[in-house]
Image (cartoon, helix red, strand yellow):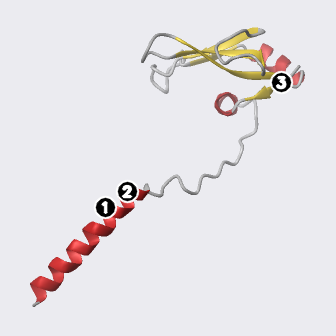
Amino acid sequence: MAIKIRLARGGSKKRPFYRIVAADSRMPRDGRFIEKLGTYNPLLPKDSEERVKMDMDRVKYWLGEGAQVTDRVSRFLEAAGELPKKERSNPKKAVPGQKAQERAEEKAAKAAEAAEAASE
């Protein structure tokens, strides 16, 4: 059985609240889980103690049993100092989208035309 430590969404529409759970990877995201390991409330400020709460003893137990951690939960564990920091690379993160690039090209072309008209 493949165990994952992942988030299960709760809360109402536009008011997310997540449980950090150990679950069989074949179960649905918000479905059956083996054990609740903590909570995550993204609506609280980032420096709040209540934003992420985890039972670290149980998390360590499940990691020892071979549980895989999802990306978001691994970031929580890295912040808590339980996992080593992973090097993440997203080279396209700072590149504007295609439409924004087209708008910038149009703006540059208009500016060049205006500069030519002013110099004549």
Comes first in the chain, label 2 or label 3: 3
Residue assigned mark 2:
99
Q: Which corner quadrant of the image does residue 25 belong to?
A: top right
Residue assigned mark 3:
67
Choose between 120 and 28: the one closer to the eye: 28
* Nearer the camera: disc 2 or disc 3: 2
Q: Residue at x 74, y 22 (%)?
A: 5
Distance, label 3 to label 1, CA atoms, is 47 Å
Q: Is residue 4 above or below residue 32?
A: below
Label 2 residue SS: helix
* Nearer the camera: disc 3 or disc 1: 1
Q: Are marks 2 and 3 in contact (CB under 8 Å)?
A: no
Which class describes the residues within 10 Å of circle 1: few (<14), some (14-19), or many (20+)?
Answer: few
- Residue 39, position as x, y percentages in the image: 61, 14
User: Which amino acid type is marked by label 3?
Assistant: Ala
Distance, label 2 to label 3, CA atoms, is 42 Å
- 28 horizontally vs 24: left or right: left
Q: Which corner quadrant of the image does residue 96 belong to?
A: bottom left
Quarter of the rendering occupied by the C terminus? bottom left
Which class describes the residues within 10 Å of circle 2: few (<14), some (14-19), or many (20+)?
Answer: few
Q: Are marks 2 and 1 in contact (CB under 8 Å)?
A: yes
Residue assigned mark 1:
103
Q: Is residue 89 above or below residue 68?
A: below
User: Which amino acid type is marked by label 2?
Assistant: Lys
Comes first in the chain, label 3 or label 1: 3
Distance, label 2 to label 1, CA atoms, is 6 Å
User: Which amino acid type is marked by label 1?
Assistant: Arg
Q: Which corner quadrant of the image does residue 34 belong to?
A: top right
Label 1 residue SS: helix
Q: Residue at x 83, y 19 (%)?
A: 62
Q: Are marks 3 and 1 in contact (CB under 8 Å)?
A: no
- Residue 112, position as x, y percentages in the image: 23, 79
